[in-house]
Amino acid sequence: YGSVAQPAAAIYEDATIRWDVVDAASTEGNRLLRDLPDDESARLQLLLKSVELSSMQEITSPGEPFEWVYFPDSCVISLVTSVNGGGVEALTVGRDGMSAFPMIGGARTAFARSVCQIPGRARRAQAREFLATLDEMPELKRRLLLYAVLAFDVTAQSAACNRMHVTEERCARWLLMSQDRAGRNDFKLTQTFLAQMLGVRRPAVTVAVGILERAGLIAHRRGRIQVVDRSGLEGAACECYASIRDRQEELLGF
């Protein structure tokens, strides 16, 4: 991943972080779509339309057919597995991926619930039309197959992480991954939603966020999180973050 440059919102005045600038979308956009062959890019321009996703907006429900495929540019989508009437995040999809990747392997319905975690922009196409033309875009198909492998590996690592590591380590890992996938340091995020993503009760998240904030690694205010000390947050995270980052670099090159 590498470090993410500080946006305009991260300006210090008398050791106080300014929150008055709305976080900007990443200028890079979705990494799977970058530097594709010209003919594939031209086909995608006909298929993809830019949309804005809002926080908590549902993308798919379990058992429903995939209607759209989303390539996030600045938003982040969570795939949430239902357990005991609640949910635990299985995978985070941002500018590194595509929402309906199980379609590449032949699935036509969703297993997990997909919901927008961090609001922002995405490009989307009708699932049926996208799948019908995918064989004509071999480079994109190759990348999506590798992304599906990465998604499996990330899910496997997260399952072990949820079992073995304490909440503040997992919280640090999750914030780093969200920062990478959103492409910015400052994003909207409530503690209630963070508790759902980590599969813990809200008081546990309050404690974890407090520990990270008192250490000067993040700032939290009115449903927004800002990463203040990227390297320090990496040091506070469990080893799962580095493992996932290295695996993504190996498979996708970014």
Image (cartoon, rainbow, N blue to C red):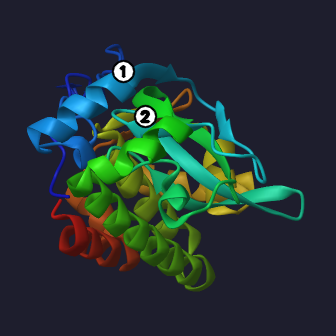
Instruction: Name the quarter where the N terminus is drawn.
Output: bottom left
Residue 176 x %, y %: 36, 56
Local crowd at mark 1 within 10 Å, few (<14), some, or many (≥20)? some
**Amino acid on which the number 2 mark rests in the picture:** Cys
Give me the disc on residue 28: none
Q: Image quadrant for the C terminus? A: bottom left
- Where 76 sits versus 49, above or below? below
Residue 200, by quadrant, is: bottom right
Residue corresponding to mark 2: 75
Please state if 153 lies on the left or on the right of 194 as rendered: left
Looking at the image, can residue 168 be seen? yes
Please tell me whether residue 193 is drawn above or below residue 17 in the rendered image.
Answer: below
What residue do we see at 52% from left, 80% from top? 156
Q: Foreground: 199 or 92?
A: 92
Q: Residue at coordinates 35% horizontally, 80% vertically from top-left?
A: 239
Q: Secondary structure at mark 1?
A: loop
